[in-house]
Amino acid sequence: MNTQLAPEQFEQPCLLAPEWLMLAEGPVRDHAVLLDGEHFKDVGPLATLRAAHPEVAVVTLPGKLVMPGFVDSHHHLTQAFGKALVFGEPSEIFRRVWVPMESGLTPDMLYLTAKLASLEALRGGFTTVCDAGTRASEGLDAIAQATTEAGLRCVLGRVCNDKRGNQVLEAAPILAEAERHIAGWQSNPLVTPSLAVPIPEIATDAMLHRISALCAEAGIVFQTHVNEHLVAVERSLEQRGLRPLEQLYQAGALGPQALLAHATLLTPDELMMLRDTDSAVSYNPVASAWKGNAVAQAQLMHSLGIRVALGTDGTRSDGFRLLDYAEAAQRFAFGMAVGDSSCGGGWPWLDQGTRGGAGVLGLNTGEIAPGKAADFLLVDLEVPELLPSWDLSWELVRLANRDQIQGVFIAGRLRLWQGWPLDWDARALMAEVNELAKAVVSGAPIQKIHPYSDAHRRDWQAGRREEGHV
């Protein structure tokens, strides 16, 4: 029976006793978790924890699941004003849409777009996002302020390329800013620094090597987009005689610190480069469907032992739909051709969307276990889509949806309740953003190739009339 819950019931310390608890080995019943502070204090059978902590109140949660929060391993927080601009557009939209739009954003605008993106992420069950770096000339502090105020954990990328067209920039100032960025977030528990080169072709080999090495030394991730679009692969072959991933390998920029976004167009040799260097991949299946040339071979990577996480690429912040896309894309692109009706069996995508993503980003979260950061979701299972339940892990991948998320907790604190934040006015933000975003987009030199739906419909109907079909 579904019981009414209220945020006040989750005041710490407390023992959460849901019907299901999602552990690393899968969902279990009759278990509980001790919530006391920013980290999980204890996890185990309910009877054991009751006996060990008799003074702590028990919050019984029938019909509910407590699971790790989703980790978005590849986001663009500063693109929230223009998501729908990319529908129907051919590849490399960054040249026609994102660079023109982002380059003109002021710190105040960056704050608002990042706050809006943070709200979307929380509503979709994400407790961590990894931002790939903005093309705006300044404003990282504003982005961090937005995510921190929202309560969202953020891996914050700083762009560090040293090529601008045919011009090679002086390396020393770029490296100095990179080091300041790494050192600048020590006191913020929700922000972790990262360094990024958006695509390998806009950096010298020396810069790629040094930025990646700085990340390795600091224990943070080096981010870049690689082998995403066919035109980029061909351009790299024409200019360098190497594919983008091969360039990174030759420059010594791969390794456990490297997080490669997309990686959709890989040869067998390039897959071995990833495995042999222990580099990680952000598999972004919605981005492949919306604006890519191909689907990453994520299931094969998983089988080869390559570390894989899931990312939205700023498309749609909905964790459950991301899991569904992750599995479905593998089935459509690879599984059906060879008669693989399982495509991993469901659980790998759930893992990659939670603890796999945390592991790739080097964060102490993504898993419900003692000592891990208390980033988790309270999910309602008493919905017709999940009844009767036979295989909860796979059902979460294929059947669950965002509306079932009752609460989002980050560092032990309830940040979102039934879709809305508790301590700031999300609707006021939305009203402010709505007007500003229209002005930003209308004033940016964006080149949109595909028309909006209404215009496309009119053009299509006009063409049908001319042909005599209407």
Image: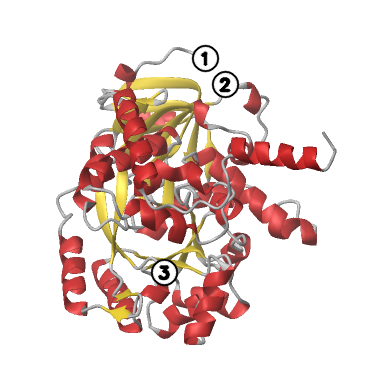
Q: Earlier in the sequence, mark 2 or mark 3?
A: 3
Residue 449 vs 180, above or below: the answer is: above
Type of amino acid at the residue the image marks with label 1 = Asn
User: Residue 406: x and y, percent?
Assistant: 44, 25
Q: Nearer the viewer, mark 2 or mark 3?
A: 3
Marker disc for residue 199: 3
Marker disc for residue 412: none
Disc 1 to disc 2: CB gap under 8 Å: yes
The foreground one among 354 and 51 is: 354
The foreground one among 460 and 367 is: 460
Few, some or many residues within 10 Å of mark 3 (<14, 14–19, 20+)? some
Q: Secondary structure at mark 2?
A: loop
The foreground one among 270 and 22 is: 270
User: Residue 266: x and y, percent?
Assistant: 58, 72
Inter-mark Cα distance, 1 to 3: 49 Å
User: Residue 243: x and y, percent?
Assistant: 52, 79
Q: Quadrant of the N terminus?
A: top right
Residue 411 vs 171, above or below: the answer is: above
Inter-mark Cα distance, 1 to 2: 7 Å
| Residue beneath disc 1 | 2
Please indicate, yes or no, whether residue 252 appears anywhere in the rendered image. Answer: yes
Marker disc for residue 382: 2
Q: Earlier in the sequence, mark 1 or mark 3?
A: 1
Locate residue 382: give its quadrant. Answer: top right
Inter-mark Cα distance, 2 to 3: 45 Å
Q: Earlier in the sequence, mark 1 or mark 2?
A: 1
Residue at 41% across / 36% down in the picture?
Answer: 120
